[in-house]
Amino acid sequence: MLDFTFTEEQEILRESIRKFAEREITPKIPEMMKQRKIPDEVFKGLARMNLLGMTASEEYGGMNADAVTTGIVAEEIAKADPTASIPVLFLVDNAWTYLVNKYGTKELKDELLPKVTKGETLVGIASTEPNFGSDIGSMTSHATKEGENYKLSGEKSFISLIRDIKERTGGFVTVIKTAPSMGTRGVTLFFLPYSDETFDVSYIQEMGREGSSWGSFRFSDVELSKKYIIGEENRGFNIIHEGFEFARGLISVISAGAALKAIDNGVNYLKTRKAFGREIGRYEGLQFQLAEDVAKMETARLLGYNALWTYDQEQRHGKFTRFDVSKKIAEAKLLSTTWAFDAINDALQWQGAYGYSKDCPEEWALRGIRSFQLAEGSKEIMKVIIARETLGKDFIK
């Protein structure tokens, strides 16, 4: 039996998020872009709606939300914020909260998760380093064990939400070498709490996503107890990919939602803008372009939700394998981010000179969505994953 419908509860949630986003997010976007910061009112609104840390267990104040339900919220937020700034906040916090909730020690969860679900703090991800992105085995950040504790040193770069996490004394899920001679089999996942005393932070200005802070940090001899280990020592490589795949699935539906909203805006323009005596939407060339964009983005949206559903089936019901999930997620992220960028660019083009102005939401969206072709694994890495699972590992280095 195939069923492509959402549950009644999910549809009710979608409608409530849509109303919330239209009322409390969309009107704040110009202010956010001017200040280059997500307004506190928006942050408080997300917390009030229980959207921060919604993937945490109910005992910590979360919803125990599955991936599909989290995707529904992500899509609606993406339609409300063309810059992709608030969607980044939402997806990072929830994907990595999920990993802490699943693999974190009880001591860590008791300390961290109630604050996350109340909106008092944030969970981020810090894996990229100056000389590597997706190649975790090449990292230089390392930890040494001293008794029951660990001392961590290294550098992480291109980290989203770095200012927000600093201001709210949150922390980062981060991957560190604990047995360098073992390669990827010798890395451990830690939760690294932010501290002014131990972090040397620098900021980077993004091409888009004006409200989402971005930067790097160095840390040296940061002492952590074993309660901050996520999962088991030297098992971090496998565990972190569960977080990446959740985040990639959310990026897929965010990209589709943003592009479909841009198409809606473009359609309004096609229906009202006249050239040579008739609405430009009557020209077949633009109609064919529109038709392709609609078909691609509705397909991408379905791929995204199918990927999130597959993730849920593997995580919650033991169906499918990790490799099945990796392939589905990679397919969705590759096509959704690529097609979304093209569709938004078309919607911008239809609007002529206005589309090139800083007042046009599609100009904001084009720069924001472009980041998702890099974030949480570049589109080239998605192709490697798809090829690996199609050909078999013997054909991939």
Image: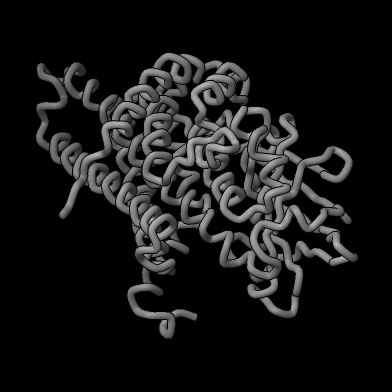
Furthest residue toward bottom? 394
Residue 4 appearing in the image: yes
- How many numbered marks, from 0 up? 0
Give the image location of residue 25, x and y in percent. 47, 20
Q: Residue at x 84, y 38 (%)?
A: 196
Give the image location of residue 77, x and y in percent. 42, 29
Q: Residue at x 47, y 30 (%)?
A: 83
Q: In the picture, residue 43 is in which quadrant?
A: top right
Give the image location of residue 389, x and y in percent. 37, 73
Give left or right: position of 264 versus 165. left
Residue 349 appearing in the image: no
Q: Residue at x 16, y 40 (%)?
A: 291
Give the image location of residue 141, x and y in percent. 76, 62
**In terms of depth relative to the viewer, which is nearer, 35 or 100?**
100
Give left or right: position of 330 versus 113. left
**In terms of depth relative to the viewer, which is nearer, 186 or 26?**
186
- Vertical position of residue 121 compared to residue 244: above or below: above
Give left or right: position of 200 versus 352. right
Q: In the picture, residue 168 is in which quadrant?
A: top right
